[in-house]
Image: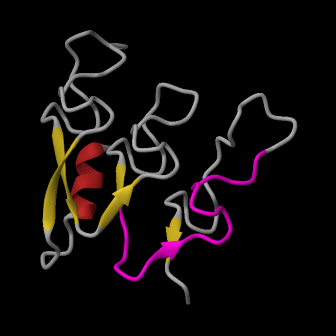
């Protein structure tokens, strides 16, 4: 999963790539939850401790840059566990979620925040006006 995300991010050969510390494992290169084994490699960075992303990028609004999906031990569905997302240069704050990257809070939910990404900005918190 991580290698396909990385290759799609690096698909544009003209993009400026920047190495970013893996948010999911904190740059250690190991599975932060030790589910398979305490020595298992991080599934996001494949044990490297960092990933390369194209500029410009912003901290993932949905997971608050942690790389972990809210209220779980899975990778964030928006940033793929990296903690940052690539954006277009002319992107601005999403007017639907007001930059939170999440759908409106649900009164019946047991969580303090919605665990679903905003459908308009796809959880990034920013979008390009069209």
Secondary structure mainly formed by the magenta segment:
loop
User: Of 51 and 2, which appears nearest the observer?
Assistant: 51
Name the residue at the bottom extreme: 130
Residue 97, how many percent across, how many down? Answer: 65, 61
Q: Decide whether residue 87 is among the magenta residues.
A: yes
- Where residue 83 appears, as percent x and y from the top left, is 36, 45
* Number of numbered discs visible in the structure rendering: 0
Position above or below: 7 against 35? below
- In what quadrant of the picture does the C terminus appear? bottom right
User: Relative to residue 20, is residue 55 depicted above or below?
Assistant: below
Corner quadrant of residue 53: bottom left
User: Which residues lie in the magenta part?
Assistant: 86-105
Image coords of residue 94 (percent x, y): 58, 70
User: Residue at horizontal 58%, vertical 28%?
Assistant: 71
From the viewer's side, name the closer residue of 18 and 13: 18
Give the left or right position of residue 101, taking residue 2 as reference: right
Q: Is residue 108 above or below residue 127?
A: above
Q: Residue at x 26, y 30 (%)?
A: 26
Whether 119 is among the magenta residues is no
Q: Is residue 69 left or right of residue 1?
A: right
Residue for point 32% across, 43% down: 1
Position of residue 79 in the picture relative to residue 44 (left or right)? right
Q: How is the image coloured?
A: secondary structure
Residue at position x 44%, y 77% in the image = 91
Residue farthest top in this picture: 38
Q: Nearer the viewer, residue 30 or 98?
A: 98
Q: Residue furthest right?
A: 108
């Amino acid at each position: 999963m991580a290698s396909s995300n990385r290759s799609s991010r690096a698909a544009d050969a003209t993009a400026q790539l920047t190495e970013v510390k893996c948010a999911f494992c904190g740059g250690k290169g190991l599975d932060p939850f030790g589910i398979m084994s305490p020595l298992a490699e991080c599934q996001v960075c494949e044990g490297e401790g960092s990933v390369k992303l194209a500029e410009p990028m912003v901290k993932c609004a949905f997971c608050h840059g942690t790389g972990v999906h809210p209220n779980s031990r899975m990778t964030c569905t928006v940033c793929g566990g990296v903690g940052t997302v690539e954006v277009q240069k002319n992107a601005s704050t999403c007017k639907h979620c007001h930059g939170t990257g999440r759908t409106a809070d649900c009164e019946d939910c047991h969580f303090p925040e919605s665990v679903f990404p905003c459908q308009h900005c796809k959880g990034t918190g920013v979008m390009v006006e069209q």
